[in-house]
Image: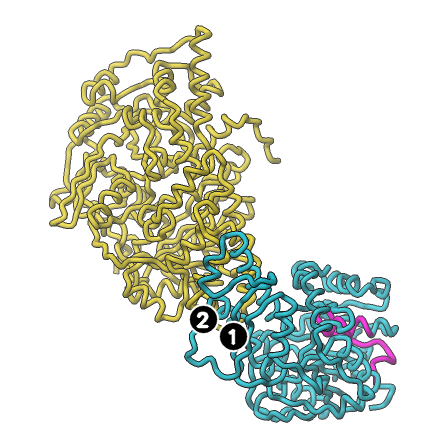
Chain colours: A cyan, B yellow
């Protein structure tokens, strides 16, 4: 891909800007003076422009709004749901496209919606790219699109036929569609595959509080249930479950987390993701796939220790092996197990991600090691933001 | 333009907001019933009547009469009506009772006139039949039979109110009224509140005929026309039996006459003629006949038209049902109506459960909560945090409930419901519920399948009677805390048998219930549900899905949708009248289009008919 094909040289079309990663990319592109056409939906009675304005406020970038144009679109409708004139004007502009829009739900019951958003919806964007002779097409995918047939995951087309959930599968299908379509029509493209992205490692700020945050939030809620029982209602029910206040004031909350192997949790901070993705967007290699992953992933045991320390708990124990017939020993353990069920594939993952392309594009920049200081910063921010309720 | 509400002081507002559900006439809380009501029997001597009477006096709509003085004097301000009325509507009628007494005291002290009723020949003849105490033309008594909150019924002040004590007296009264060409209406407890029981001639109040005679050998109970559903169920349960009855204050015979009895138990016990083995009537001409007599008029048949009154039901032989000691309940949650309906239909087709019903959010929250503020919070918690839009209630024996579990539907069992009920205030503010609602598990409501979930809910909600009533009026709180410590008050099985919480539907506003029979067809139900909603919203009326109970093994169902109105807001009443007209036309349109929809309006006065004749109207249309 020539230098001139990069999005930084002109305005580009960005989808998914109201999401976590798309939003951060938008902010960084704006900070670098780029002009963007934001394509997306209104939601909850709020126009796309208002949704983006809220985000700009969060980033402290309201003054950058002049660099933005808004297009309310529906990717599942012909012509992206735009009027013919509007679509034609957009087509003539030949913008580079950064496609971040995605349905990130894991549950099988959401398969149809996830496939529609991530695969069917992609077709309309790709069609626009072809018809407008876009300068390049960038797909934001996931490291976990690699599937589960192989543990050595290379920056190469997906080989697996099996996946943990419809989300992973949809991302693999999307990658296949992008590479096939773009290669067939000579449209330059890249695929960016981040691992699990958490907040800003330097400040703790984040827009989303799922993934890494969900188990910690679950533990916090369970802790608060039993603290209230002990402090306000005598704690009989807590005692029956072996839950008690310890001498130092911490809560003994015996919860076993069963995982099949020690495994890895591949975490990257959103500030790393943004910097790396921008480096790729500035110097894209046609057809390249980039793993934005950590060479030194965390482990569940380590995260459990962090969570205990942060929440003033003891008794949280990671047990290697299947729970099998082991009876859940108390209500908290049982409910916590249910809470983290959707994330099970990612808390003891055995996949390794090569990252030669990413290293080349980013000059070898690596995500920060996930230590307690980062964990605490992120969780303090999450608690202060009430897990997203008090963000704006 | 909306009319500005007439300012009312609190006492008058309470008086004018009596819902006429007659709950003060039954001892549904075990706290006793108004003593003067039990003695004098006329509605006027119960708190409901005194509410009407005070409002009429305060607004100078009637003069002070001898009965006014007696009604006011006979109230001993015991406060029982506060418990009963607060339970249902959150109102405290004792202030009205006190105001009534004070009004009369001041009137008399000021030398005010006490206007004696005029001498009346017909009244004298009525009294010769029923005795001096049981017929009157005193306006203070007549007034309390003159109206109800129905927005389409005009008040009609009866010339006479008669309370016969036997079938022979009823027959004699009917013949007398016929002879004098006096029109009449027959009244049970008037709890239908649809304007059916008013007449400018005479109102025959059946309230004195309270005989209950069990014939367990034949699995039936003979019930006098004055027996209320609650009292009959209590007597049946004391014998380890059950009857299929409806609202607790509704008189059983009147309820059957009106439209037939349906309840959540109708899923297995049926409706209309299914639960009546025999009945005794006084025909319009005054002769007595028995339903089981081959020569009697055929009341089992059904005509799709506004039917005339076939007679006055003076007693009925009601079917008794067995009760097993392993009966319990489960509430199965659903996020959408179609899934809930499909499940209810499957249960009925498989004949699982004694009582089955699809319940809406308003039902659950309003029924369980002792105050309207809590009900609002509970409704939000169920809908927004737990993502529960509908619940399918199943009552059955251990085998039935095991079958429900085996069908793969986790639910709130009776223990969990009791925990939830007594912990409702904590439920409303519980942060951990957000995580429950966010569970993206493929199996909906999987948390209910956890072995220890009730234990966690117990720790988190700290359920207790004291907690449940913490927002109740402080003066009444000790009573209600004691009340909710009684196990039956949080037992869905008992509550469904006695239905004492369903009157809370009218706590915020009076309810106009739309009831139709139709197939359990998800699309048809959704269409009609949507039409009800659109009509109500077009007229700015509060509205909500009520309930659906499968009938006849899931081939049909009874569907209730509810509209609400402020009975004292003329503008809202006007909008309700318009909405009722449109909703009626909408039902008729579906009836014509499908041939399978029957509006309960057409069953009115035909409640003894065989259910098959109105559930399957195609049969009547002929081959």
**Considering depth in this image, is A244 or B347 the residue closer to the camera?**
A244
Question: Of helix, strand and loop, which one carries label 2?
Answer: loop
Query: Which chain letter goes with mark 1?
Result: A
Q: Are marks 2 and 1 on the same chain?
A: yes
Q: Is residue B488 left or right of residue A123?
A: left
Residue tagged by mark 2? A329
Vertical placement of residue B252 versus B106, above or below: below
Which residue is pictured at 47% across the width and 37% down the height? Answer: B90
Query: Which chain letter goes with mark 2?
Result: A
The x, y position of residue B475, in whole percent, is: 47, 33
Magenta stretch: includes residue A24 = yes
Vertical placement of residue A56 versus A231, above or below: below
Q: What residue range appears in magenta? A: A6-28
Which residue is pictured at 42% across the width and 24% down the height? Answer: B97
Magenta stretch: includes residue B382 = no
Residue count near mark 1 (Cα–Cα under 10 Å), binned few <14, some 14–19, many ≥20: many
Q: Is residue B238 left or right of residue A137?
A: left
Residue tagged by mark 1? A256
Q: CA distance from mark 2 to mark 1?
A: 9 Å
The x, y position of residue A275, in whole percent, is: 80, 79
- Report the number of discs: 2
Disc 2 to disc 1: CB gap under 8 Å: yes
- Kindly indicate the quadrant of the structure image that contains residue B312: top left
């Amino acid at each position: 891909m020539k230098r001139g094909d990069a999005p930084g040289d002109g305005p580009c079309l960005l989808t998914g800007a109201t999401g976590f990663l798309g939003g951060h990319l938008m902010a960084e592109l704006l900070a670098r003076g780029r002009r963007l056409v934001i394509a997306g939906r209104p939601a909850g009675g709020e126009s796309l422009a208002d949704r983006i304005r809220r985000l700009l406020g969060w980033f402290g970038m309201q003054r950058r709004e002049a660099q933005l144009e808004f297009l309310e679109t529906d990717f599942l409708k012909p012509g992206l749901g735009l009027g013919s004139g509007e679509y034609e004007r957009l087509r003539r502009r030949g913008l580079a496209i950064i496609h971040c829009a995605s349905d990130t739900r894991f549950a099988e019951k959401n398969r149809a919606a996830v496939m529609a958003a991530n695969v069917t919806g992609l077709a309309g964007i790709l069609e626009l790219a072809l018809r407008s002779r876009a300068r390049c097409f960038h797909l934001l995918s996931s490291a976990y699109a690699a599937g589960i047939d192989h543990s050595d995951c290379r920056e190469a087309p997906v080989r697996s036929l099996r996946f943990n959930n419809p989300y992973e599968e949809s991302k693999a299908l999307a990658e296949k569609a992008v590479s096939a379509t773009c290669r067939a029509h000579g449209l330059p493209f890249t695929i960016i595959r981040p691992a699990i992205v958490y907040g800003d490692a330097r400040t703790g700020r984040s827009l989303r509080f799922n993934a890494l945050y969900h188990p910690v939030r679950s533990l916090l809620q369970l802790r608060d249930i039993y603290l209230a029982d002990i402090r306000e209602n005598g704690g009989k029910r807590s005692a029956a479950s072996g839950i008690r206040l310890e001498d130092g004031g911490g809560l003994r909350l015996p919860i076993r987390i069963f995982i099949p192997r020690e495994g890895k949790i591949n975490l990257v901070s959103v500030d790393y993701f943004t910097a790396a993705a921008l480096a790729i967007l500035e110097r894209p290699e046609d057809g390249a796939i980039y793993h934005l992953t950590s060479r030194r992933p965390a482990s569940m045991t380590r995260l459990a220790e962090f969570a205990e320390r942060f929440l003033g708990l003891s008794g949280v124990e990671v047990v290697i092996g299947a729970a099998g017939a082991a009876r859940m020993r108390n209500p908290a353990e049982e409910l916590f197990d249910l809470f983290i069920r959707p994330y099970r594939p990612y808390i003891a993952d055995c996949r390794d991600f090569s990252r030669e392309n990413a290293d080349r594009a980013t000059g070898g920049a690596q995500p920060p090691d996930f230590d307690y200081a980062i964990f605490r910063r992120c969780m303090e921010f999450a608690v202060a933001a009430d897990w997203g309720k008090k963000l704006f | 333009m909306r009319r500005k509400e007439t300012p009312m002081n609190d006492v008058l507002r309470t008086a004018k907001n009596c819902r006429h559900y007659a709950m003060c006439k039954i001892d549904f809380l075990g706290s006793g019933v108004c003593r003067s009501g039990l003695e004098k029997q006329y509605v006027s001597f119960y708190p409901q009547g005194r509410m009407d009477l005070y409002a009429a006096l305060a607004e100078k709509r009637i003069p002070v009469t001898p009965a006014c003085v007696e009604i006011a004097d006979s109230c001993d301000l015991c406060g029982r009506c506060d418990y009963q009325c607060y339970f249902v509507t959150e109102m405290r009628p004792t202030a009205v009772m006190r105001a009534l007494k004070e009004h009369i005291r001041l009137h008399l002290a000021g030398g005010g006139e006490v206007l004696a009723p005029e001498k009346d020949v017909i009244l004298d003849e009525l009294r010769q039949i029923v005795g001096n105490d049981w017929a009157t033309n005193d306006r203070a008594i007549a007034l309390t039979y003159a109206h109800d909150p129905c927005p389409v019924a005009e008040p009609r002040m009866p010339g006479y109110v008669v309370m016969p004590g036997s079938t022979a007296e009823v027959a004699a009264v009917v013949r007398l009224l016929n002879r004098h060409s006096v029109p009449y209406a027959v009244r049970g407890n008037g709890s239908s509140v649809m304007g059916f029981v008013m007449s400018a001639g005479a109102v025959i109040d059946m309230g004195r005929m309270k005989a209950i005679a069990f014939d367990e050998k034949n699995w039936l109970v003979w019930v006098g026309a004055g027996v209320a559903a609650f009292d009959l169920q209590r007597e049946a349960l004391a014998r380890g039996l059950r009857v299929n009855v409806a609202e607790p204050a509704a008189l059983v015979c009147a309820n059957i006459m009106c439209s037939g009895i349906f309840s959540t138990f109708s899923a297995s016990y049926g409706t209309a003629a299914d639960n009546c083995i025999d009945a005794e009537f006084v025909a319009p001409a005054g002769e007595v006949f028995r339903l089981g007599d081959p020569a009697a008029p055929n009341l089992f048949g059904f005509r799709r038209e506004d039917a005339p009154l076939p007679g006055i039901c003076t007693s009925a032989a009601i079917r008794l049902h067995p009760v097993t000691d392993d009966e319990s309940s489960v509430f199965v949650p659903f996020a959408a109506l179609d899934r809930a309906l499909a499940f209810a239909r499957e249960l009925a087709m498989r004949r699982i459960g004694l009582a089955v019903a699809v319940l809406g959010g308003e039902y659950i929250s309003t029924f369980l909560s002792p105050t309207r503020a809590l009900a609002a919070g509970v409704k939000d918690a169920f809908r927004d945090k737990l993502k529960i839009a509908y619940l399918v209630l199943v009552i059955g024996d251990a085998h039935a409930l095991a079958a429900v579990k085996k069908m793969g539907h986790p639910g709130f069992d009776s223990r969990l419901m009791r925990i939830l009920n007594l912990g409702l205030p904590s439920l409303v503010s519980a942060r951990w519920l957000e995580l429950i609602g966010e569970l993206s598990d493929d199996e909906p409501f999987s948390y209910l399948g956890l072995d220890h979930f009730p234990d966690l809910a117990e720790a988190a909600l700290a359920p207790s009677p004291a907690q449940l009533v913490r927002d109740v009026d402080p003066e009444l709180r000790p009573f209600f805390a004691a009340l909710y410590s009684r196990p039956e008050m949080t037992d869905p099985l008992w509550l469904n048998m006695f239905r004492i919480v369903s009157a809370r539907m009218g706590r915020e506003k009076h309810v106009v219930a739309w009831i139709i029979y139709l197939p359990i067809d998800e699309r048809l139900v959704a269409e009609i549900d949507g039409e009800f909603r659109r009509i109500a919203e077009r007229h700015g009326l509060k509205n909500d899905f009520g309930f659906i109970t499968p009938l006849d093994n899931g081939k049909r169902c009874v569907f209730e949708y509810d509209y609400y109105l402020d009975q004292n807001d003329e503008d809202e009443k006007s909008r309700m009248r318009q909405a009722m007209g449109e909703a009626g036309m909408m039902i008729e349109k579906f009836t014509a289009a499908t041939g399978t929809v029957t509006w309960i309006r057409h069953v009115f006065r035909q409640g003894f008919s065989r259910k098959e004749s109105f559930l399957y109207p195609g049969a009547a249309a002929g081959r």
